[in-house]
Image (tube, grey):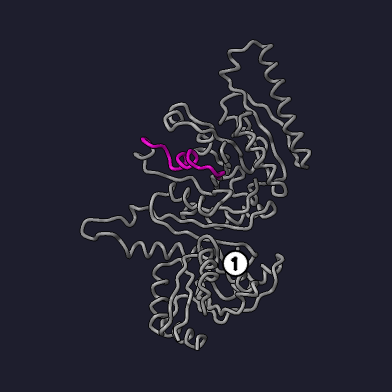
């Protein structure tokens, strides 16, 4: 699992060229092709009473996007990279998924996607929708890092949150393939405080020991590949503890796996990846189980 | 005699613009929406001239140009670059590809930066195709 092609989705007011530049460290892991995508929301050019379809507005918005992409592409072309661009009209998530498929991308990079308040109430955010439907890893890029500014290489110090599921194995494979771009990996497992509450002291210690052993085994796998990896066990709310771990170890990015579940199950029972996607201050890499 | 001119361009308006000019000067336009389709058309249609954009989906004009000029059977087809990307960037990108292990390739027959006047394009095409 390597990253050779990256889809960079930009609305221009939320994700800029410096974010892309900070990801070029992935060239050491094989990145050589960047595909730009800008989606013009349908309502910006939709039919209006008395004016019809806003063709002139569409042309203007396309031109603005084209100029930005040419500017960004020139820098990448001069570095010997392959660059492609798509400017589309419609709903952002279906367009992202469609371009990701036709361009065979290995990673989708986007800022947090916003929906109207009413839309979020009934259908969740665009980000959740993307995470639910994507079969490729998605990097939700956040500018507000822990140090207050965007990191130079978000892949430098990773927090890897593992729950020992199939998606955790995918997370491991993915990060191991990033050798060269990653300097340090903090491996985190969170024991759920509700589950711990039901156990005796002896059972709790046993559970802790078992999980520490599994964490050590994972660290050994990374050590064999010459990664600097350290194990950490936390107890509490999973999403909160992952964020705490990221802060404690001054991580530059959080990496989690995600499982397939229904919209309603996610909406009412919650999902760690979706919770982190909505509030994490750090860039968040979400790797689907079927990636 | 009418000659085949392949225009590789993702913008439908510019494809229409170029094909109108090609027809007006008595030649046959062939169209492709990206570099990948462009290479298929080159191999299938064997055009006499290629008008090539750079920033496109699937495969860029930078890569397609390098493929054309690295293939002995296609190297002689003249190429006119028509793009919003500057000539300086284009030339630097070809040098960068060489640094990454590809062989050096010759410069294109002409480099036109968008937007191009219809007279300039038709004059350029007539000069190369005559």
Magenta range: A121-138
Side of A8 where B75 appears, left or right:
right
Is A2 in front, or is A272?
Answer: A2
Residue A5 found in image quarter: bottom right
Q: Residues within 10 Å of mark 1 (few under 14, many from 20)?
A: many
Above/below status of B64 relative to A182: below
Q: Residue at x 43, y 40 (%)?
A: A125
Q: Which residue is mark 1?
A: B63
Q: Position of residue A85 (x, y in %)?
A: 50, 60
- In percent of width and height, residue A33 lies at 60, 58
Is residue A134 a member of the stretch shown in magenta? yes
Residue farthest left in this picture: A50
Q: Position of residue A201 (x, y in %)?
A: 67, 11
Please identify the dominant SS of the magenta region. Answer: helix
How far across and down, in percent of the image, does residue A45 sit? 33, 57
- Secondary-structure class at tag 1: helix
Q: A78 or B23, which lies in front? A: B23
Chain letter of the residue carrying label 1? B
């Amino acid at each position: 699992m390597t990253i050779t092609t990256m889809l960079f989705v930009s609305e221009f007011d939320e994700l800029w060229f410096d974010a892309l530049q900070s990801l070029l460290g992935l060239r050491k892991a094989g990145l050589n092709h960047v595909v730009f995508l800008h989606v013009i929301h349908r309502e910006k050019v939709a039919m209006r009473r008395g004016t019809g379809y806003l063709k002139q507005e569409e042309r203007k918005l396309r031109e603005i996007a084209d100029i930005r992409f040419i500017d960004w592409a020139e820098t990448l072309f001069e570095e010997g990279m392959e660059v492609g661009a798509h400017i589309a009209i419609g709903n952002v998530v279906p367009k992202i998924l469609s371009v990701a498929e036709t361009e065979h991308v290995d990673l989708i990079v986007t800022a947090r996607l916003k929906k109207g308040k009413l839309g979020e109430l009934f259908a969740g955010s665009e980000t959740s929708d993307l995470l639910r439907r994507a079969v490729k890893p998605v990097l939700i890029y956040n500018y507000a890092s822990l140090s207050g500014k965007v990191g130079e290489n978000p892949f430098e110090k990773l927090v890897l949150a593992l729950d020992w599921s199939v998606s955790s194995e995918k997370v491991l494979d993915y990060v191991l393939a990033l050798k060269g771009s990653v300097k340090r990996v903090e491996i985190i497992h969170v024991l759920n405080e509700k589950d711990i509450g039901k156990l005796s002291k002896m059972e709790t210690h046993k559970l802790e020991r078992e999980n520490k052993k599994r964490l050590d085994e994972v660290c050994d796998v990374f050590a064999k590949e010459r990664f600097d990896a350290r194990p950490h066990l936390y107890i509490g709310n999973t999403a909160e503890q992952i964020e705490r771990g990221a802060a404690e170890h001054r991580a530059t990015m959080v990496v989690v796996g995600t499982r397939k579940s229904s919209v309603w199950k996610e909406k009412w029972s919650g999902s760690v990846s979706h919770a982190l996607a909505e509030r994490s201050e750090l860039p968040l890499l979400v790797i689907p189980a079927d990636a | 005699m009418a000659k085949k001119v392949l225009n590789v361009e993702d913008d439908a308006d510019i494809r229409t613009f170029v094909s109108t000019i090609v027809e007006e000067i008595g030649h046959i336009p062939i169209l492709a929406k990206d570099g990948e389709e462009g290479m298929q058309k080159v191999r299938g249609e064997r055009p006499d001239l290629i008008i090539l954009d750079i920033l496109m989906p699937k495969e860029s004009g930078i890569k397609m140009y390098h493929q054309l000029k690295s293939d002995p059977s296609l190297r002689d087809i003249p190429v006119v670059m028509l793009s919003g990307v500057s000539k300086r960037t284009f030339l630097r990108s070809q040098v960068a590809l060489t640094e990454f292990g590809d062989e050096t390739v010759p410069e294109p027959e002409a480099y036109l930066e968008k937007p191009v006047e219809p007279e300039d394009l038709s004059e350029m095409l007539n000069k190369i195709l005559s």
